[in-house]
Image (cartoon, rainbow, N blue to C red):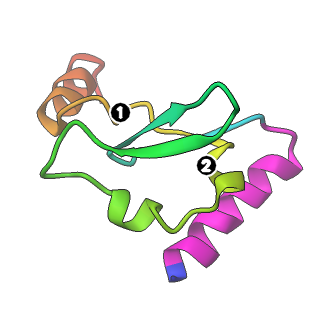
Amino acid sequence: MCNKEVKFKAFLDYAMSIDADYIAMGHYAQLRRDEDGRVHLLRGADDNKDQTYFLSQLSQEQLQKVMFPIGHLQKSEVRRIAEEAGL
């Protein structure tokens, strides 16, 4: 509950207060948006790093404002990309 109520909510609230459209998070999860606008949380591609157990607590309103750009990748791919970028 702490992560949902404190960290995630505080970050999202701050982002919205500065007129951000979305926030991008480094969680291993994916989203699917229906034609009616509803967002569905899906497991990340890396079963060993899947974080939907935590993210399933997020509201539909919160899911509407978040992106998970690495959710379709394996952790090894993320590390390789970061290394290639000098990070």
Crowding at label 1, few (<14), some or many (≥20) Cα neighbours within 10 Å?
many
Looking at the figure, which quarter contains the C terminus?
A: top left
Name the residue tied to disc 2.
Answer: 63
Given the image, on which type of amino acid does mark 2 rest?
Answer: Leu
66 up-or-down from 55: above or below: above
Q: Position of residue 76 (x, y in %)?
A: 12, 33
User: How far apart are labels 2 and 1 at the CA level?
Assistant: 16 Å
Residues drawn in magenta? 3-20
> Who's the residue at 45% across and 62% down the image?
56
> Who's the residue at 77% across and 34% down the image?
21
Q: Is residue 13 magenta?
A: yes
Name the residue tied to disc 1.
Answer: 70
Determine the secondary structure under disc 2: helix
> Who's the residue at 38% across and 48% down the image?
27
| Pointer 2 or 1: first along the chain | 2
Q: Position of residue 22 (x, y in %)?
A: 69, 37
Given the image, on which type of amino acid does mark 1 rest?
Answer: Ile
Residue 75, picture quadrant: top left
The answer to which of 87 and 8 lies nearer the viewer is: 8
Tell me, yes or no, if residue 24 can be seen here.
no
Chief SS of the magenta region: helix
